Amino acid sequence: MIETGLEGKTVIVTGGAAGIGRATALRFAQEGCRVAAWDIHDDEAEAAAAELEAASGTEATFAKVDVTDRAAVDEATEAVAERWGGVDVLVNNAGIVLDSQLVKWKGGEVVSTLSDEAWDAVISVNLKGVFHCTRAAVPHMIRGGGGVVLNASSVVGLYGNFGQTNYAATKGGVITMSKSWSRELGRHGIRVNVVAPGFIATEILRAMPERSLKGMVARTPIGRIGETRDVAEAYVWLASDAASFVHGAVLSVDGGLVIGT
């Protein structure tokens, strides 16, 4: 088994109630980390915390945290640092999707447009939320002698996608924001990297029509939809000692997805 050097580390995972976030929190717990899972939805809080504790054999917590709320993020970060003595790894996974064409044109007229509300909501969670959480965690990492920040982008952030102007803007912004932070924070021993998933079998994806799912598989050279664990493994590797010289990178976890083919 590869030694990751993660045992005993303190890890925060946003959007940790379900999907990729929950799988990621679980994988860090399996490495013996102390995991704080955050999510706006807390209906799974007790089950998630119990699952993480059972996997890690150490403490784990679940907190209801709205990443768009600076005060809530600052308070939750301070609570983690006070409880466990610092913050070693931050996984900015929380995100939402509110898809719409910029301008939908039919029959010679505008049928609908991307609303200000949908734009603002996605920007607030997917981009500003990453900013809030990273700004709150970094001082603790500096005091502790270093750390790792891992941010969730998407293949959409690299290539764009029909009907996802707002989502693509945030995921592209996460990439360039992360690259800027890698220039600023490397001197403090903080590594910053990005994971860009392709089609991953979350609950939202599983609810899609079979025809759509087959189309996704057809566009993925490896011939399958990704599993949440595939992304979680990427996060764990990037946080580990094995990736100690990987900094400012974007790791695509997409089965070789080729957009438009």
Image: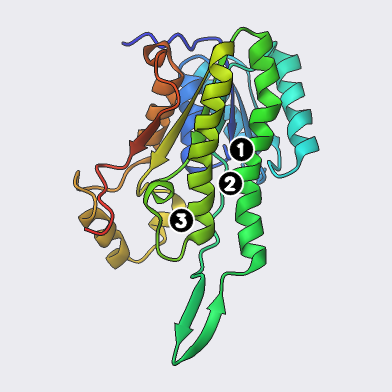
* Mark 2 or mark 3, whichever is nearer to me: 2
Asked if residue 138 lies left or right of residue 215, the reply is right
Q: Does residue 228 show up?
A: yes
Asked if residue 250 lies left or right of residue 58, the reply is left
Question: Residue 152 location in percent, x, y?
Answer: 49, 38
| 3D distance between C-alphas at marks 3 and 1 | 22 Å
Question: Residue 7 location in percent, x, y?
Answer: 50, 10
Q: Quick check: 106 above or below 183?
A: below
The quadrant the C terminus occupies is bottom left
Precedes in sequence: disc 3 or disc 1: 1
> Looking at the image, which residue is at 71% across and 43% down?
66
- Labelled pair 1, 2 in contact (Cβ < 8 Å): yes
Q: Residues within 10 Å of mark 2 (few under 14, many from 20)?
A: many
Q: Does residue 89 show up?
A: no
Q: Which residue is mark 2?
A: 126
> Looking at the image, which residue is at 74% across and 29% down?
76
Q: Secondary structure at mark 1?
A: helix
Question: Residue 141 location in percent, x, y?
Answer: 64, 15
Query: Mark number for residue 204?
Result: 3
Of 143 and 226, the residue lying toward us: 143
